[in-house]
Image (cartoon, rainbow, N blue to C red):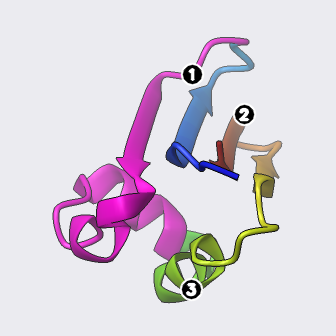
Amino acid sequence: MNKAGLKIRIFKGGETEPETTITIPLAILRFATKLMPKQAASALQEYGIDLHQIVELSQEEDVHGTLVEIERHKKNEKVIIAIE
């Protein structure tokens, strides 16, 4: 299976379209994590998501689709992390 990339989508205010979408090609994911926008890295850290584990998962052939979906109801925010 040819995996295109890791996608991080950040939704605000109950919108159906993401406020921010970050796509990182899997071929360069290990290096791109150092270049990731602070907003995305902060969101991952805030939710206790280990970016290094996501990098390891991305190397598995049978891992694809949504990895994590986090909803913060009081802040009306949602973050989706997927391999697509």
Question: Is 59 situated above or below 52?
Answer: above
Q: What's the magenta region? A: 16-45
Please say whether residue 23 is one of the residues in the magenta stretch: yes
Is residue 70 toward the left or the right of residue 10 in the image? right
Of label 2 and label 1, which has the lower sequence position? 1
Identified at 36% across, 61% down, the residue is: 27
- Cα distance between the residues tagged 3 and 2: 30 Å
Q: Is residue 69 visible?
A: no
Instruction: Tell me where residue 15 appears, x and y as whole percent.
Output: 69, 13
Q: Secondary structure at mark 2?
A: loop
Identify the amino acid type marked 2: Asn
Please name the residue that numbered disc 2 is placed on. 76
- Choose mark 3 or mark 2, whichever is in front: 3
Q: Circle 3 sits on which residue?
A: 56
Badge 1 is on which residue? 18
Q: Earlier in the sequence, mark 3 or mark 1?
A: 1
Circles 3, 2 touching at the beta carbon (< 8 Å): no
Give the image location of residue 42, x and y in percent.
39, 65
| Image position, residue 72 (x, y; %) | 76, 49
